[in-house]
Image (spheres, rainbow, N blue to C red):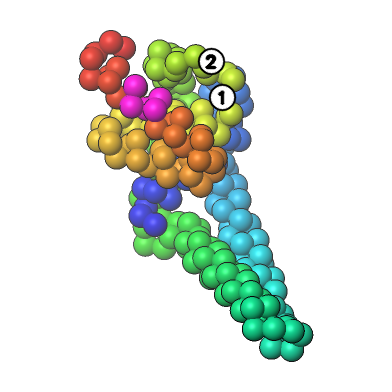
Amino acid sequence: MLPRQIARELALLSLSQLPTTPEKLETQQLQDLMLAAVRTLRTEASEALETAAAELQRSSDRLLDSETIANSVPSARAMLKESIELAQLAINRVGSAMEIPELVYLSSNQQEVYEYALELTKLVHANRTEVDNILKQSLVNWQLDRIARIDRDILRIAVVEMLYVGIDEKVAINQAIELAKRYSGNEEYRFINGVLRRVSNLLKSNLV
């Protein structure tokens, strides 16, 4: 994962811990939020590894069953196929867990990750009213306060990147989609994609 990708994830997790009503935040409070976000990601990675270990054990057991209790070739093949699928699932989980953002956060990229995550968190918090007004103009048959908070925060981060950071709109939208895929679901990421494309058109039209 690239430093800014990790920073967006840390910012998203930090925003979820902010009060719903805007209030002044001290730098130390924001730093504490960053640390809590890192710990959340570390816990998630640890749980993923534990799940992978359990799935590998199930795979091994199923493979053994295919050799010892299968009463026909088709039955053995079915057990073997299930074993391979479980092993693949475990491998995928390990691969995901190995992208533990904390490892990068504590590496040579620490300062870049920290500074960008802090910048995004501050910008979203300080400009929430303006950002939310832009989002409200870009929603179709939806109310902003009816959207899940995690999805609102993903949208807010993307709008902040477009409006205040100067990130290319396509990049901001693509990164928001990646966050949505990780923290929401298929329908949500499509919804977020649609809203942000309307935001992009709104900004290009200078209607905000």
Secondary structure of the residue carrying numbered label 2: loop
Marks 1/2: CA–CA distance: 7 Å
Q: Residue furthest top?
A: 207
**For the residues bearing labels 1 and 2, Cβ distance under 8 angstroms:** yes
Q: Amino acid at mark 2?
A: Gln
On the picture, is 180 further left or further right than 55?
left
Image quadrant where residue 19 sits: top right
Q: Residues within 10 Å of mark 1 (few under 14, many from 20)?
A: few
The image shows residue 73 at horizontal and vertical percentages of 64, 83
Stretch in magenta = 194-198
In the depicted structure, whether residue 107 falls above or below residue 122: below
The numbered dot on residue 143 is 2
Q: Amino acid at mark 1?
A: Ile
The percent position of residue 177, horizontal first and vertical second, equals: 41, 40
The residue lying toward the viewer, choosing from 172 and 63, is 63
Q: Residue at x 52, y 16 (%)?
A: 142
Q: Residue 53, located in which quarter of the rendered image?
A: bottom right
x and y percentages locating residue 198 in the rendered image: 34, 22
In the rendered image, which quarter contains the N terminus? bottom left
Front residue of 128/186: it is: 186
Quadrant placement of the C terminus? top left
Nearer to the camera, 105 or 198: 198
Tell whether 9 sits left or right of 52: left
Q: Which mark is residue 164?
A: none
Q: Is residue 164 above or below residue 67?
A: above
Count of marks overlaid on the render:
2
- Residue at image position (61%, 56%) is 44
Instruction: Name the dominant secondary structure of the magenta segment.
Output: helix
Relative to residue 106, is residue 200 drawn left or right? left
Q: Which mark is residue 147?
A: 1
Q: Secondary structure at mark 1?
A: loop
